[in-house]
Image (tube, helix red, strand yellow):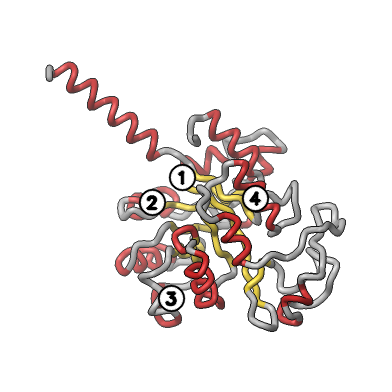
């Protein structure tokens, strides 16, 4: 091989590697809740069909021990029922209808984690298990039963020591993502401790102020094989670099562009359709 051909091949491989490395994954917060009730089976199906890489959902438990999908501590806002999930058996809670974005009751019902995982099984999408900290053992059993363990991401805003103390037997068996508040003075130490002791899938980094040194340089995270997960959905999670700034004001420079420039490899969004279109136009998503 001549030097010229070798250099051309090297440049091509470098470009391909850089292109793959620069791809940004899209996580749909509570599914496609603008076109279906939040945390409904339909919302997750819609988001998956849309082409997102991750759907986020929230876990709760009924009085008879069934793990269901519900964000709030009560079902008041999202259904035509009232009370906590734990106030009802699964058969009882299943009778309520989920409300859509306008507050109208639909024919969609509160799904179980098992139903969601069976629906998404084998599809090119991960499932982000929010509010799952109290239910790791139950969730793990469901994932094992459905053969979907590799599709699920467990998460919590705890230190490595706390994770090890509560779930020592699961640490090596699950895909895990620490949630870290970058506004706290010990944020970088929390990240470093995780990297020393395990291989997290990613770090979900939240911040009300965008001055953290971790945002300026997070190669110490990515060099260990972990992803940087940033949230574009609420200003309180990203110092105002949010979805609506991009979608409603057309200002991607201070929203999605800013988050990507500060290391985002996964963006959790309330605007999955628009974010996918934006990333594809930038050649940052397939």
Disc 2 versus disc 4: distance between alpha carbons? 33 Å
Q: Quadrant of residue 97?
A: bottom right
Q: Earlier in the sequence, mark 2 or mark 1?
A: 2
For image coordinates 53% across by 47% down, the residue present is 53
Looking at the picture, tell me which residue is in the foreground, 228 or 97: 97
Q: Secondary structure at mark 1?
A: loop
Confirm or deny contact between disc 2 and disc 1 (CB under 8 A): yes
Looking at the picture, tell me which residue is in the foreground, 132 or 50: 50
Q: Which residue is mark 2?
A: 218
Q: Quadrant of residue 171?
A: bottom left
Q: Earlier in the sequence, mark 3 or mark 2?
A: 3
Q: Earlier in the sequence, mark 3 or mark 1?
A: 3
Q: Is residue 243 visible?
A: yes
The residue carrying pointer 2 sits among few (fewer than 14), some (14 to 19) or many (20 or more) residues within 10 Å by Cα, namely some
Q: Quadrant of residue 198?
A: bottom left
For image coordinates 75% across by 47% down, the residue present is 35
**Mark closer to the observer (2, 4):** 4
Mark carried by residue 163: 3
Task: Indicate left or right for 285 with 50 as reference.
Answer: left
Q: Secondary structure at mark 4?
A: helix
**Mark closer to the observer (1, 4):** 4
């Amino acid at each position: 091989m001549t030097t010229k051909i070798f250099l051309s091949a090297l440049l091509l491989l470098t470009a391909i590697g850089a292109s793959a490395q620069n791809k940004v994954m899209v996580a749909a917060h509570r599914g496609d809740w603008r076109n279906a009730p939040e945390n409904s089976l339909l919302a997750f199906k819609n988001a998956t069909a849309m082409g997102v890489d991750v759907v986020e959902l929230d876990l709760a438990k009924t009085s008879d021990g069934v793990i269901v999908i519900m964000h709030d501590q009560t079902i008041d806002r999202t259904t035509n029922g009232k009370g906590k999930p734990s106030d009802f058996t699964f058969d009882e809670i299943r009778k309520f209808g989920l409300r859509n974005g306008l507050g109208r009751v639909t024919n969609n019902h509160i799904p179980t984690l098992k139903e969601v995982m069976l629906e998404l099984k084998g599809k090119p999408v991960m499932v982000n298990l929010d509010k799952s900290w109290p239910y790791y053992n139950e969730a793990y059993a469901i994932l094992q039963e459905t053969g979907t363990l590799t599709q699920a991401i467990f998460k919590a805003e705890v230190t490595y020591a706390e994770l090890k103390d509560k779930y020592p037997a699961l640490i090596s068996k699950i895909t895990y993502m620490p949630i870290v508040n970058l506004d706290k003075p010990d944020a970088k130490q929390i990240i470093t401790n995780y990297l020393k002791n395990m291989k997290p899938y990613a770090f979900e980094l939240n911040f009300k102020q965008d001055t953290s040194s971790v945002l300026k340089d997070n190669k110490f995270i990515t060099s260990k094989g972990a992803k940087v997960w940033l949230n574009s959905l609420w200003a309180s999670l990203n110092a105002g670099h949010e979805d609506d700034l991009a979608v409603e004001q057309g200002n991607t420079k201070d929203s999605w562009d800013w988050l990507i420039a500060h290391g985002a490899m996964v963006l959790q969004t309330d605007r999955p359709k628009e974010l996918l279109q934006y990333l594809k136009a930038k050649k940052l998503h397939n």
